[in-house]
Image (cartoon, rainbow, N blue to C red):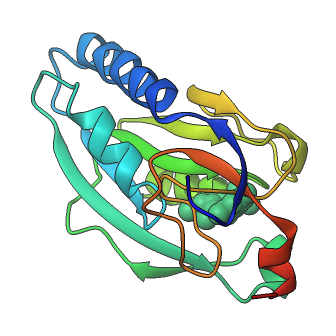
């Protein structure tokens, strides 16, 4: 285990099993369609990659990178598009893949955007849900795991751009935040 991790909340095996379950479910649901899977960078990358390996039907992939305007203004709900889609959304069945829903601001922005762009349907799939963090009313259609109101890292989620590569979800040791060696 990584030396900065205090405890593992969700193991690699549990995550992989969940990805299989979600991917197989999407296969059934979209069997006669050609959905557009949209990964929210960078956090959703490992999750999207693993889920889509279990989707056994036609599916297109694209990516979007969004960020909140500065840490302080996050609660304002102002989201900036860093990288937009290459694909037209109009008339498409959209599957949004996210790492975590916390306040819900990022996702509610994306859902509004894809509605405005005339998506035919929008499904929200998130690996993690932190219901206690919610400030706007938004619910995922598919949730991998609920997590408590703690800062979590691993499997796409970072602290200062580290730990995204870990195959599990964990909580950092306090000394990492305090910046001790
Ligand atoms: P909102 O609040 O818009 O935020 O739902 C979603 C984004 O915030 C980040 N986030 C976290 N990142 N550990 C992280 O590494 C966490 O516990 C955490 N909570 C929120 C993340 O980028 C997510 O997409
Ligand atoms: Mg994110």
Q: Residue at x 13, y 21 (%)?
A: 56
Asked if 47 appears above or below 31 in the picture, the reply is below
Asked if 111 appears above or below 94 in the picture, the reply is below
Q: Residue at x 48, y 79 (%)?
A: 81
Percent position (x, y) of residue 36? 25, 43
Which residue is the extreme one toward the left?
58
Q: Quadrant of residue 3?
A: bottom right
Percent position (x, y) of residue 102? 75, 52
* Viewport quadrant of the C terminus: bottom right
Answer yes or no: is residue 76 visible: no
> How many marks on residues?
0
Q: Residue at x 23, y 59 (%)?
A: 88
Percent position (x, y) of residue 70? 73, 89
Q: Quadrant of residue 87?
A: bottom left
Q: Residue at x 35, y 14 (%)?
A: 25
Ligand 1 image position (quadrant): bottom right
- Near-viewer residue (169 or 81): 169
Percent position (x, y) of residue 35? 23, 35
Left or right of 23: which side holds 96?
A: right
- Near-viewer residue (41 or 177): 177
Answer yes or no: is residue 59 visible: yes
């Amino acid at each position: 285990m990584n030396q900065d991790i205090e405890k593992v909340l969700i193991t690699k095996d549990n995550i992989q099993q969940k990805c299989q379950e979600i991917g197989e479910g999407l296969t059934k649901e979209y069997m006669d369609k050609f959905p557009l899977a949209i990964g929210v960078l960078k956090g959703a990358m490992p999750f999207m990659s693993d889920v889509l390996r279990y989707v056994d039907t036609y599916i297109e992939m694209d990516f979007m990178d969004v960020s909140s305007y500065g840490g302080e203004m996050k609660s304002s709900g102002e989201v900036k598009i860093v990288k937009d889609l290459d694909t037209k959304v109009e008339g498409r069945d959209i599957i949004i893949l996210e790492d975590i829903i916390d306040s819900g601001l990022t996702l509610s922005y994306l859902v509004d955007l894809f509605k405005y762009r005339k998506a035919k349907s929008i499904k929200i799939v998130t690996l993690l849900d932190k219901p206690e963090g919610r400030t706007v009313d938004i619910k995922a259609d598919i949730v991998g795991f609920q997590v408590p109101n703690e800062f979590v890292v691993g499997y796409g989620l970072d602290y200062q751009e580290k730990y995204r590569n870990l195959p599990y979800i964990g909580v950092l040791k306090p000394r990492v935040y305090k910046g001790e060696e």
